[in-house]
Amino acid sequence: MQIVPLVATGAMAFGALLVFGALLVLFRRLSFARRATSLDGTVIRCERESTDGGWVYSPTVRYQGLDGRVIEYTPAISTSALDYAVGERVAVLVDPQSPSSVMIGRPGSARVWVVPIVFAFAGLVFGGVGALMFVIASGRAEALLRFLM
């Protein structure tokens, strides 16, 4: 068996998995945003931690929960960008059925949608490269070029 069709099939499968993952994350975030309540919060600190790739940041936000209690929330995942300044007011999305489900940022903000967009783009690139490799390896590249022209 030739290696190129195998690599092409692997690239297409990996691309499909990335697109599927992007759609899954997108569906979950849309579902969360639809049922979440937006509350006002304030960034009270931003921890900076050194990693092999540089620095990562974890903001801690204080907000008044749906039950009136003051809550401090720090996302489980740090980011490489310092998105928030101490004292900055931010939106805190809270699921009323599950108050421990929290997301920082408004539903339409780029921060909320960047992960699905990046995954979908990477999946399309992998899938496209795999498909192109498959067409070239199968000897149909000339027919494809005629079709595209």
Image: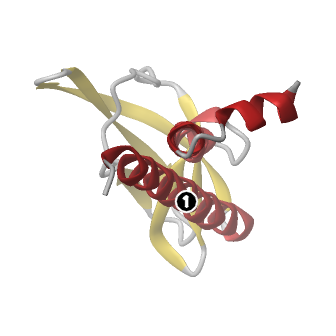
Residue under the point 67% across and 69% down: 31
- Residue 20, horizontal then vertical, whole percent: 56, 62
Between 97 and 53, which is closer to the camera in this rendering?
53
Residue under the point 59% across and 46% down: 120
User: Which residue is at the far bottom?
Assistant: 97
Residue under the point 74% across and 66% down: 34
Residue under the point 42% across and 50% down: 5
Q: In this view, does 65 lie above or below 113?
A: below
Q: Is residue 91 visible?
A: no
**Quadrant containing the C terminus in the rendered view:** top right
Q: Is disc 1 surrounded by few (<14), some (14 to 19) or many (20+) residues within 10 Å?
A: some
Q: In which quarter of the image is residue 10?
A: bottom left
Between 85 and 106, which is closer to the camera in this rendering?
106
Q: In this view, does 134 lie above or below 36?
A: above
Q: Can residue 130 be seen in this view?
A: yes
Q: In which quarter of the image is residue 114?
A: top right
- Residue 27, horizontal then vertical, whole percent: 65, 65
Residue position for label 1: 25
Q: Which amino acid does label 1 sit on?
A: Val
